[in-house]
Image (spheres, helix red, strand yellow):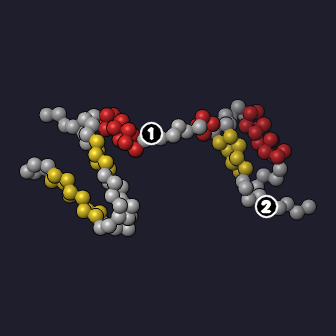
Amino acid sequence: MSRRLCRLKLPNANVRSGMDIKIDDSDGQFLEYNTIGGIIDLYFVSGPTPVEAAQQYSEVVGKTVMMPYWGFGFHQCRYGMRDVYEVAEVVANYSKANIPLETQWTDSKRKQISS
């Protein structure tokens, strides 16, 4: 016997309220959601395969935005770099050591250096 896949998503805006889910397939199937308050958005997609269920769900809620290409690369960050020359030295050392580096981050809360 082949089984069909169904996806049911019930986001509830009232996260502090309880949610009780009852599933019974002994004498006919039923699915019961009990919530206390909140705004309910109910999505039901019938599949029948997991790939088709995911495609149907994405048609309803929209597709995810593609991650920027540079975000897939190697990143490096270190707290307390003194100036742009120190940043350039770190980048040069990565190149010299043949270590891939896509992005170099610097901290935004740089401490003042007293002279």
Mark 2 is surrounded, within 10 Å at the Cα level, by few (under 14), some (14 to 19) or many (20 or more) other residues, namely few
- Dot 2 amino acid type: Lys
Number of marks: 2
- Dot 1 amino acid type: Lys
Question: Viewer-nearest of labels 2 and 1?
Answer: 1
Dot 2 falls on a residue whose secondary structure is loop
At a point 73% along the width and 59% down the height, the residue shown is 109
Q: Give the distance between the C-alpha atoms of the residues marked 2 and 1, in whole angstroms.
A: 42 Å
Q: Are marks 2 and 1 in contact (CB under 8 Å)?
A: no
Dot 1 falls on a residue whose secondary structure is loop
Residue 40 place in picture, x, y as percent: 33, 58
Q: Residue 65 vs residue 80: left or right?
A: left
Mark 1 is surrounded, within 10 Å at the Cα level, by few (under 14), some (14 to 19) or many (20 or more) other residues, namely few
Quadrant in the picture for the N terminus: top left
Quadrant for residue 89, please give it: top right
At a point 82% along the width and 53% down the height, the residue shown is 82
Pick the residue in front: 107 or 65: 65
At a point 29% along the width and 67% down the height, the residue shown is 36
Q: Residue 92 vs residue 25: left or right?
A: right
Quadrant for residue 54, please give it: top left
Q: Residue 34 vs residue 56: left or right?
A: left
- Check disc 1 and report the residue beneath it: 63
The label number, if any, that marks residue 31 in the structure image: none
Q: Earlier in the sequence, mark 2 or mark 1?
A: 1
Residue 73 place in picture, x, y as percent: 61, 36
Pick the residue in front: 87 or 19: 19
Q: Is residue 45 above or below residue 16?
A: above
- Check disc 2 and report the residue beneath it: 111
Residue 53 place in picture, x, y as percent: 31, 38
At a point 33% along the width and 34% down the height, the residue shown is 51
